[in-house]
Image (cartoon, helix red, strand yellow):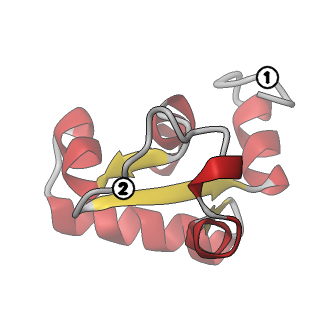
Amino acid sequence: MLRRTLTLIAGCQGVCSYDDLARELGVSQALVEQLVADLLRSGCLRMATGECAVEGCASCPLRTSCSLPGGIRLWQLTEKGRRWLARTGEIGARG
């Protein structure tokens, strides 16, 4: 389930809500929050909110698709997360 969660986050370019992930996975939002926390702790995923505050939306490659309304989170796969998904065939090594 961790790999599937990471794959979904990669597929939405890191911009998604816990509700969206829960719906896609067919599980509760509480479970999704735990899965994301596990991915953050493992180093496969990181929150990308710091960049939003520092750089602003103008320089963000997701500026046309991301408005970050309530409930939406912005995550970024780490190199470790990309390697894990590449090993499992979910995404390319640089995808």
Q: Which residue is mark 1?
A: 92
From this view, report whether residue 79 is shown above or below residue 8.
below
SS for tag 1? loop
Q: Name the residue type under label 1.
A: Gly
Give residue 71's position: percent from left, percent from top.
Answer: 24, 62
Q: Name the residue type under label 2.
A: Leu
From this view, report whether residue 48 is shown above or below residue 53.
above
SS for tag 2? loop
Left or right: 29, with 34 as reference point = left
Q: Which residue is mark 2?
A: 68
Depth check, mark 2 against mark 1: the one in front is 2
Residue at 59%, 66% (x, y): give it: 52
- Label 2, label 1: how far apart the Cα atoms are: 27 Å
Looking at the rendered image, the quarter that the C terminus falls into is top right
From this view, report whether residue 18 is shown above or below residue 13.
below
Give residue 54's position: percent from left, percent from top.
Answer: 68, 75
